Image (tube, rainbow, N blue to C red):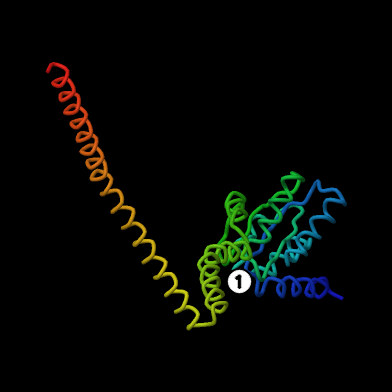
């Protein structure tokens, strides 16, 4: 069997894997221990990423006339590719995180949604949150208004629907009227305080005047 015929199934396998890929990342895996390589494969698999080592010539053939043909310039030395069809940033994110503990692992380059990125560009791609994280943040931003609305609906239901809501509104209005009435009484009482003080002072002055008149009469009687 000719060498070309032997290579064709592998080339077809690579072509099938990248056909619907949102991203393909080429990595240099030299220096990884067996345990590290096993752990890396597990983490990529859990993230829905296909990871496999292929010969550079096979990848060159498979990438030809595709969005990933631009990767041909980094296909030298031992190379592996990480492929994702669901989350465009997943390969770069998982590999970059893993490389912090295993610096022997290096990203050579990648193509994300049809755009080529070198090693530095892939580091920037790795910092982009996953789709689930973005959805979680979006959900969190709208959760508060929904929660408030749900509490209002619950309160209406507990009060007997619309009628209960009307009754609750009426009760609240009555409470406000009562509060206003109490405030008016307090203000009226406060306004009466100076009058009462004035009356008390006048009464006290009258009493003092009577005492003085009585003393004067007594003195006049003594002189006579």
**Vertical order, 36 against 207 (above or below):** below
Left or right: residue 71 compared with residue 206: right
Residue at screen point 66% across, 55% down = 74
Judging from the image, what secondary structure is the residue with disc 1 in? loop
Expressed as whole percent of the image width and height from the top left, the position of residue 149 reads 51, 72
Expressed as whole percent of the image width and height from the top left, the position of residue 92 reads 66, 57
Q: In which quarter of the image is residue 210?
A: top left
Q: Quadrant of residue 223?
A: top left
**Vertical order, 10 against 97 (above or below):** below
Expressed as whole percent of the image width and height from the top left, the position of residue 194 reads 24, 43
Residue position for label 1: 65
Closer to the camera in the image, 89 or 202: 202
Closer to the camera in the image, 29 or 93: 93
Left or right: residue 26 compared with residue 5: left
Expressed as whole percent of the image width and height from the top left, the position of residue 83 reads 70, 65
Q: How many marks?
A: 1
Left or right: residue 145 compared with residue 133: left
Q: Quadrant of the N terminus?
A: bottom right
Closer to the camera in the image, 208 or 85: 208
Left or right: residue 124 compared with residue 18: left
**Vertical order, 196 against 39 (above or below):** above
Q: Tell which residue pokes out farthest to the top in this image.
A: 223
Residue at screen point 72% across, 45% down = 100
Q: Tag 1: Cα neighbours inside 10 Å, few (<14), some, or many (≥20)? A: few
Q: In which quarter of the image is the C terminus?
A: top left
Residue at screen point 58% across, 63% down = 134
């Amino acid at each position: 069997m000719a060498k070309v015929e032997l290579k064709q199934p592998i080339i077809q396998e690579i072509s099938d894997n990248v056909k619907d890929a949102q991203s393909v990342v080429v990595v240099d895996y030299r220096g990884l221990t067996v345990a590290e390589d096993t752990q890396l494969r597990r983490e990529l698999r859990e993230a829905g990423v296909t990871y496999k080592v292929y010969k550079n010539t096979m990848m060159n053939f498979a990438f030809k006339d595709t969005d990933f043909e631009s990767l041909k310039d980094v296909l030298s030395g031992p190379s592996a590719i990480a492929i994702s069809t669901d989350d465009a940033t997943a390969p770069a994110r998982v590999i970059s995180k893993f490389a912090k503990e295993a610096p022997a692992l290096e990203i050579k380059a990648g193509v994300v949604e049809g755009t080529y990125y070198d090693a530095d560009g892939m580091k920037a791609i790795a910092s982009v949150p996953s789709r689930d994280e973005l959805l979680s943040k979006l959900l969190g931003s709208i959760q508060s208004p929904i929660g408030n609305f749900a509490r209002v609906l619950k309160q209406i239901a507990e009060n007997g629907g619309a009628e209960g809501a009307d009754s609750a509104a009426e009760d609240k209005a009555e409470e406000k009227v009562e509060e206003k009435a109490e405030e008016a009484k307090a203000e009226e009482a406060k306004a009466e305080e100076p009058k009462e003080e004035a009356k008390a002072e006048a009464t006290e002055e009258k009493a003092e005047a009577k005492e003085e008149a009585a003393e004067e009469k007594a003195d006049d009687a003594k002189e006579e």
